[in-house]
Image (cartoon, grey):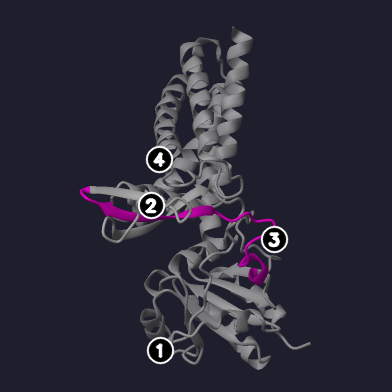
Amino acid sequence: MKLTTNLVRIIVGVLFIFSGLVKANDPLGLSYKMQEFFEVWGVSRLDPTTLASSVIMNAFEIIAGFALLLGWRIRLFSWLLLALIIFFTFLTGYTFITGKPTNCGCFGDCLPISSRTSFLKDVALTVLIAFICWQRKYIQPLFAAKLNNILMVLVIIFSFGFQWYTLRYLPVVDCLPYKKGNNITDLRKVPANAIPDSSVILFVYKKGNEEVRFTAENFPADFSDSLYTYVDREDKLIRAGVNNHPPIKDFVLNTATGADTTEAILAEPRVVLLFVQTAKDAASGWQKKFEPVYKAAVQSNVPVHLVTGTRADLERAIQGTPLQGASVLTCDNTAIRTAARTNPCLYVVEKGTILGKWAAPNMSSAIPLLEKK
């Protein structure tokens, strides 16, 4: 039993560390997923709360996983993990049954798994953690108490420090479709091997006091305008398509007049895009950090566009600064949140291909890509 218990604690500990690290690489991604759950349940958006909850939850998974491996305060963490996994099982079960949201985000964007797989994983983990709670007497500290304490302090510092870094400087591992080297133009297209949805048109008519539905192929034998009154038509999904959505959706860049300029911008030999989700929430002093990049781009005749979901706020933010002459474009806010995991986020794009992306603190790293050669 001792061997089994320790094998189970290693499996559970490693899984929680892996899960926490994958999500800690992109805490904003988990916070957006939390907001999806709030919206499904009719709760208003709570951005600051969800981000803080995301950071704490990711850190806890890492800390609890290491606590299991080190045998540190095993009674406390075994019960905390059991409570957490029961909560996770409820969420993944809800997603599996209702289909909302479409994905629970259990392993972030780096390892997307189906809602069914997520639910079954959590059910299995619930059983394993319950077993650990039952047999925790067989789990002993891996090292002396002082060394275990030092190691856990280091783990705690790392679990929060790593997330601070990714929130400030972008994820260390980019698993999004907008990662460096990807071509936005190509990824806006439906994959060549896509299978479209299969649907049928149903006509809804009223015959007497009864509503009847039928397709164009099976009209009733007694159909006539005197017996049937048209009510509506419906599109009924017969079979869901496969791989029939482009990896990049809703990425449309509009001018002040509402003109779609996406294709023209992505066809440029080189262009600078600065995504500013909301000017009021952008990193402090971002204008000053972006000015050298803007100057280098102008000197090299490289077009510069600021992309935002709130044009008026951004135009006010750059008024009276060296950036006030820059083009301001609008884009769907969800697309911006996916493209820019920091606010703001700088892109240098060459004919649709992302050459690089940077957060505000290291925007100057883009200048070599813009200088004349």
Residue at disc 4, secondary structure: helix
Measured from the top left, where is residue 50 in percent x and y? 38, 51
- Residue at the image position 47 percent from the left and 43 percent from the top: 104
**Crowd around label 1: few <14 · some 14–19 · many ≥20 (10 Å):** few
> Is 176 or 148 nearer to us in this picture?
176
Q: Which mark is residue 192?
A: 3
Is the residue marked by circle 2 packed among few (<14), some (14-19), or many (20+) residues within 10 Å? many
Outermost residue toward the left? Answer: 209
Name the amino acid type tagged 1: Gln
Q: Earlier in the sequence, mark 3 or mark 4?
A: 4
N-terminal of the two: label 1 or label 2?
A: 2
What is the quadrant of residue 269 in the picture? bottom right
Assess whether residue 312 is covered by the magenta stretch: no
Q: Can residue 150 be spotted in the picture? A: no
Residue carrying label 1:
319
Residue topped by disc 4: 98
Question: Which callout, 1 or 3, points at the residue further toward the start of the chain?
Answer: 3
